[in-house]
Amino acid sequence: MNRASTLFLLAALAVGTAGAQDLSAYRTLAGSLEAAAQARPTSAERALAELDRAETAYAQLAPTLQNKQLLGGLRDTLDSARAALARTPAELQAQVLLARGLMRKALYNQTLTQLAHTPPDLSPAAGTAQMKLLAQDFGLTGAPAAALLQDAQAGHLERVAWRLQRAAAQKVSGALQATPAQRSPEAYLNLARATSWFTVVQDAGVSALKVAQFESALQQLTEGDLPALTASLKTLRQGAAALNQAFAAPPTVARSATQTSSPSPAQPSTTPVAAAPAQAPVAATASGGMTASGGVDVAYAALGRALTAAGHSDPETARAELVRVSAALATFPAALRTTAGYETFVRDLSATQERRGLRPGDVQALIAELGGLERSLAGGGRSTVDVLSAAVARTFNGGLRAVVFLLLALLGLVPLYLLNLAFGGRNPYWRAITAALALLLLPVFLEGVFGFLGWVGDLSGLALLRAAPSLTLWQGVYGLPLRALFTALAIGLAAYGFRGLCVQFGLLGRSSAGSMTAQPSLDWDEEPT
């Protein structure tokens, strides 16, 4: 291997491992949390010491976690675990279970996202340590763990996602079945365990279950509302059964003509495998499980919900839906993941998840990018307008957009002030012209003031300020008729004002002596000749 090839391989390896989590800190955090839960019944001091070790491990792990929403949830859960030391041992154990669920979710998302855009020639070696840790965390040993690693090394990410989601769904169902409809520590812990495992599969798009239903059941158990708890457990168990049914059959995978048709150890010989070209999209399975092509549909659905949330000034929900898109990347067709522009789409998606002051245009740019990838895969060209839109959304967003439009809004007051200073307010025609200019600048004023307040609200978490962008005229389609109305009024006022000036100065029609007498001051530097 020559020097140039070596440098290229090292660079590719650097790209493939970029963004990987600190696995040592992950293991230390997991071990310390579980040790704290085990120590709490006999020694609160020992449990506190273990939580201190967990805090140190969290500080090492946090910079390597890409999903800030999961990171914030993990931070809150660790704080709740420390607060639970003063309460019952079951409280601390429940908080540890929830924290472990968030950790698994973060490792799952980040590992599959990393593998999804790892160069194909590096896929056999990429992410092996993460996959082994995932297998351990999900309780996969022996043949199931080996099958998981084999699918990961073969680049069958839809199969990797299915194996992990199926394991999580089985644990959700098992924990719910073990939850009695009574107020007891056993019921509380099993319900918390089910909630923890459901965190992994909540973005799969194959079940009607929501995290809020688990939270509601926990609240009912805490309050002792046993009739409501019984009904909730029945609903949750039915949803878990449907979830397991959705993951009953493995998704099919695309195979190239050079691959052998014999089944792998991870795949029983009775499972049909589509002998499709390597570039062909993967079809959905009859069981309704998420397949590669289904992953694109899930991404589009999540992007649509994110667009709706952004349009209603709800950036938190929008970012949560974008996290679902990231989770769906692992189930994209292999051909789509190798299409030119895919890496840029992944980077833009990750950056948008972290963006403050999220606006509908940011999500629209992502939708356009994903559509461009599909057109490229089908042999079509990418739209120049979509490429430019993505570039603008990438650079002119968040705080930069908010500050720029606030400055424009403030600067817009300058010509209005100067106009009034130069010509005063005695002449009705100049007043009409001033009003026309103010109406034309009104959308900029609203965008500058309320857009900036919305950005500040997103940074501070204040819901009242966060909703301010809804009052701008550029947030949604509802602003279009208002902008048209204000523009029409501005045109009418400007035409009225300039026509009056033309009449006063004899440029249009005839100005009578009476009218000249009635206007001794024409608000002009010189008398008309």
Image (cartoon, rainbow, N blue to C red):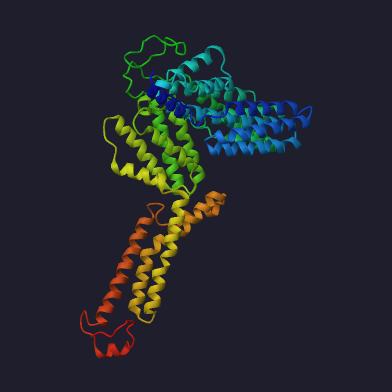
Q: Where on the picture, by quarter, is residue 273?
A: top left
Residue 117 image offset from top left, x and y in percent: 42, 28
Residue 158 image offset from top left, x and y in percent: 43, 23
Left or right: 496 with respect to 145? left
Q: Quadrant of the N terminus?
A: top left
All told, the count of numbered labels is 0
Q: Residue furthest front?
A: 3
Left or right: 522 with respect to 118? left
Q: Where on the picture, by quarter, is residue 35?
A: top right
Q: Quadrant of the C terminus?
A: bottom left
Q: Residue at x 38, y 26 (%)?
A: 333
Residue 49 image offset from top left, x and y in percent: 74, 31
Does any portion of residue 396 appear in the rendered image? yes
Left or right: 236 with respect to 338? right
Vertical placement of residue 510 versus 327, above or below = below
Q: Residue at x 29, y 42 (%)?
A: 384
Q: Where on the picture, by quarter, is residue 93?
A: top right
Q: Residue at x 76, y 37 (%)?
A: 86
Q: Residue at x 65, y 37 (%)?
A: 219
Does any portion of residue 312 appear in the rendered image? no
Residue 349 image offset from top left, x and y in percent: 44, 38
